[in-house]
Amino acid sequence: MTDPRPEAQVVLRLENITKRFGKLTANGAISFDLRQGEVIALLGENGAGKTTLMNILFGHYTPDEGHVEVFGMRLPAGNPRAALAAGVGMVHQHFTLADNMTVLENIVLGTRSIWRLGFGRAQARQRIVTLMEDYGLRVDPDAQVGSLSVGERQRVEILKALFREARILILDEPTAVLTPQETDDLFATMRKAVALGLSVIFISHKLHEVMAISSRVVVLRHGKLVAEAKTSETDRAAMAQMMVGSEVAAPVVRRADPGAALVTLAGVSSPDIGSAPGLKNVDLELRAGQITGLAGVSGNGQTALADLIGGLIRPASGTFHVKGDAPRGWSPHAAISAGIARIPEDRHKTGTIADFDLTENAVLELYSRPGFSRHGWMNWRAARDFAAKIIRGYDVRCPGPETRIRLLSGGNMQKLILGRVLETAPSVVLANQPVRGLDIGALTYVHEQLLAARDRGAAVLLISEDLDEVTALSDVIHVISEGRLSPGFARGAMTPAELGVWMAGDGFEEAPHAA
Amino acid sequence: MRLEPIANPTWTRSLGLPAVALFATVVVASLLAMIAGAQPFSVLGLIVKGAFGSKFATLETLNRATPLIFTGLAVAVAFRAKLWNIGAEAQLYMGAVFTVVLGTGALAWPAFALLPTIAVAAMLAGAVVLLVPTFLKTRFSVDEVVTTLLLNFVVLLWVSMLLEGSLKDPMGLGWPKSARLIAEARLPRIAEGLRLHWGFGLALISALVVWVIQRRSTLGYEMRAVGLNPAAARFAGIPVNATLIKTALLSGGLAALAGFSEVAGLKGNLTLDISPGFGYTGIIVAMLALLNPLGVVVAALFVAGIFVGADSMSRAAGVPTYLADIMLALALLAMVLAIMLTKFRVRRD
Ligand SMILES: Nc1ncnc2c1ncn2[C@@H]1O[C@H](COP(=O)(O)OP(=O)(O)OP(=O)(O)O)[C@@H](O)[C@H]1O
Ligand SMILES: [Mg+2]
């Protein structure tokens, strides 16, 4: 991106913002300016305080000290209404749409008094259609939000902000849930917005995106602003170092020493899950001491495969063996008992229970084991010790084991899940999008743990949309497309371009595995 | 106007708001009393006096609270796991019927063997009535609100049929009522000469047991997990359906104990009006208690106190007893609002 003119007007000023949660200082005296036409990338580790800062800016939280100025006017603290009126629009990390309403209703919702019945539908629709064209945000205004994909929902969120005449857009980790193609579309929208005079604050852990879209970076570490730089004058390594405070080295991958096949699928098919395809005649072997990578655009059968190995579904046809046995009564409990550690794709919906504390979440899969319970009675002391051990061993940043997990940042939640499943020394590790939303420090940490599990002799299945991640870690790569699985390719056997061809669904006809 | 979720409500908020709600109830009820022509603030005093003003009144209130503790616990247990049991009334009557079936001479056992047997049989009967809707829910996703509610009417009509038929007291001069229980099947009084039977003690013990189960047992943990996030519970290998079934057993059994205690403790026989809606009032009790088993005891005493106190209040102040019903309804509305406001903040737009 080109830099905005240096004399461009300051549209947003954060003055000395401090926010404490009990003993924890989530934001410590943070000040910076946003100029018109600028895209600031806000960087920082998980739990650095980015979301907190944006929530203050948007009036969801009241700062303990400091204030926010928008277009030279001081915003009243803790008042989202005033922030909206001043032209600040926010797209949250976790969406806030009503599933049972249409796109149009969601966008208009809250802009009219709830006491008024009709709301000038035709007029509203006209404006929304114009906005869609201006910003390249395609979505059917009459679709039910519940039926939309994540990418579409996000577009609705952005439209919602634009409909309220936002001049400043805040996007909290918008790309964490997007496919690469959707990310490109989002960037096109952001460029259009900037061209139309808007300013953007953009949060992401993916540094190549930051390089591509931002004009300036602001880095937070442990709640403090530690660095500010023009994007053109910095690079990925430097940014990583600013965030973490020390150099981040990608983990060294030693040679794999594959052993026996621990999980085997032969000709396995499974029913479709909603609009996502099920498995189609899939052959797969997960060998001990080896990382098997699964590349592919999400929504191509990854969920079905993860659900099958994780015990949530059973194959409709074909043979499925775990450690040589065809499991009878396959269930999550059976999978856990068979030593399969599962890192779920959605840590909020399936990985954790938001209103349980860390202790209760730590033993979610293990509470029925001797040690954590006896004759139907919980041993809470043992559970707390276990949680404390994970907190220490996996560097989960939190006030303590009795914190509700809802309050943890995404990375720390993931570390708890990682600790919970790896502490049991599993023989199979099923990692489904394990680094989604994680900072590079945490990401590197997760990768190290997966490699360590492999080196201990575990069979690891890594499912990821990020081809770089899959190729860097995997000893064998399969590509999944529309529920079909490619043959396994050894490390380095295929170039990214060749894998891309398979990901697009070509190559399967010639493959011996095709149905 | 818009609601905004609060991440972690403060203690003052989560305890203060319910207190404010109760206070507001009292104020509004007093105003209504004034409209009805009574001294505004005397009404409350009269209710308290009527409910706890004498030994007789207090015992009456405790007796009245007993079935409410059981049904309140039944609802609290079920709602915690998001099993919407609206059928405590039916489960109560099942318990009452089995108490009569076994307690009118069918088993000639001594009291120490007979009473526990009857209690267990009653609990099983109540549990079975809730198992059917629970099974339909887990198996075919049939909404249990509808099925449990409808079963109330089914069971009540069935009891009415029994009281006109096989359970009818032959010496009853044609009234639809059952024969009286034998002496061994009656719950003894807590102390000699005290008009309070052991049903009340059993209710207190039940509350304590349920509290311990929820906090300390694996079942309590499973019930909370299933209630808060069934998808995550299932993923973690918690047997969701089995947990709901166990919850139903516990909930239905507790509601049935209300029937057992009313028949074996208070009344001595079964009539169609043995419960003036204790099953439904149990929902109010559980909500007022925020589903906390120990809170249920307090809430049941509160509700029973209003009912008992309302009678003497209406006589003394010359206002209708309906005022008590209105007060309860107000208390519930205010409490529901207060609970919501502990979780959400109202923002003006
Ligand atoms: N409402 C709250 N109460 C208590 N602590 C909180 C609350 N909200 C956030 N925190 C804590 O404040 C810190 C900063 O959290 P924040 O969500 O701002 O991090 P973040 O930089 O957005 O992280 P991520 O990249 O994972 O989204 C974390 O340690 C978090 O646990
Ligand atoms: Mg965040």
Image (cartoon, rainbow, N blue to C red):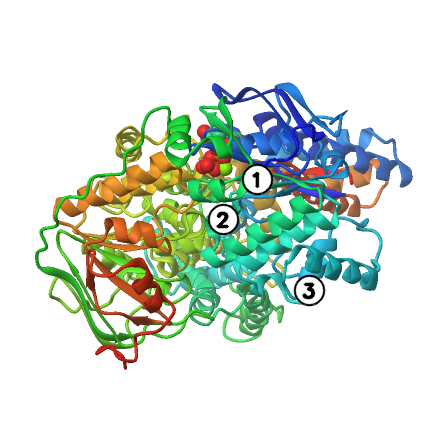
**Mark 3, residues whose alpha carbon is within 10 Å: few (<14), some, or many (≥20)?**
some
Q: Nearer the viewer, mark 2 or mark 1?
A: 2
Please, what is the three-letter code of the amino acid marked with disc 2?
Thr
Location of residue A114 in the rendering, given as x and y in whole percent from the top left corner: 79, 51
Mark 2 CB lies closer than 8 A to ligand 1:
no
Q: Quadrant of residue A465?
A: bottom left
Quarter of the image where the C terminus of chain B is located: top right
Q: Which residue is mark 1?
A: B289
Asked if both marks, 1 and 3, belong to the same chain, the answer given is: no
Which residue is painted at 72% across and 59% down in the image? A105
Q: Which residue is mark 3?
A: A141
Labels 2 & 3 near each other (Cβ < 8 A): no
Q: Is residue A425 visible?
A: no
Location of residue A162 in the rendering, given as x and y in whole percent from the top left corner: 71, 49
Q: Chain of mark 3?
A: A
Distance from disc 2 to disc 1, alpha carbons, whole Å, reads 44 Å
Which residue is painted at 60% across and 29% down in the image? B15
Q: Chain of mark 1?
A: B
Q: Nearer the viewer, residue B347 or A232?
A: A232
